[in-house]
Image (spheres, rainbow, N blue to C red):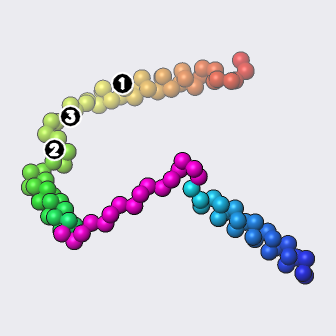
Amino acid sequence: MKKTLLTLSVLLASMLAVNAYAQKAAPGEDRAAPAASATKEEKAAAKDTRKTEGSKAAKSGAESDKPSTTASKKTSKAEKDAAKAKRKTEGAEAAKAPKKGEAQ
């Protein structure tokens, strides 16, 4: 029992040591300097500017939000059938062709 407990404790210590060394910053990989926190006045001013910009954007409406006004060309049933037949023949030819790496 003592040998098992000793073995497990050594194993656990080595696992924890690896994690502890992995957390350290290597030379040349220093962390960024902490930024100074903003004051309440700065936060309020930033909030006001975001609010006004957001309301302007909502009132004007972005171009990407508006649906397209150009109508797409309607295709006839015959054109659709012709395109389908073309795809089907191309697919059949591709299936018959020898595959890459396949013996001929």
Query: Within 10 angstroms of label 1, few (less than 14), some, or many (20 or more) residues?
Result: few
Dominant secondary-structure state across the stretch colored magenta: loop
| Discs 3, 2 touching: Cβ within 8 Å | no
Q: Nearer the viewer, residue 64 or 45?
A: 45
Q: Residue at x 65, y 64 (%)?
A: 20
Query: Residue 102 appears at what percent x and percent y?
Result: 69, 23
Type of amino acid under label 1: Ala
Q: Secondary structure at mark 2?
A: helix
Query: Within 10 angstroms of label 2, few (less than 14), some, or many (20 or more) residues?
Result: few
Q: Secondary structure at mark 1?
A: helix
Numbered tag placed on residue 63 in the rendering: 2
- Tell me, yes or no, whether the highlighted magenta stretch contains residue 32: yes
Q: Quadrant of residue 52?
A: bottom left
Q: Earlier in the sequence, mark 3 or mark 1?
A: 3
Type of amino acid under label 3: Ser
Relative to residue 96, is residue 32 drawn left or right?
left
Q: Which residue is mark 1?
A: 82
Q: Secondary structure at mark 3?
A: loop
Q: Nearer the viewer, residue 102 or 82?
A: 102
Q: Residue at x 80, y 74 (%)?
A: 9
Viewer can see residue 4? yes
Query: Residue 48 appears at what percent x and percent y?
Result: 14, 64
Give the residues in magenta. 26-41
Q: Earlier in the sequence, mark 3 or mark 2?
A: 2
| Discs 3, 1 touching: Cβ within 8 Å | no
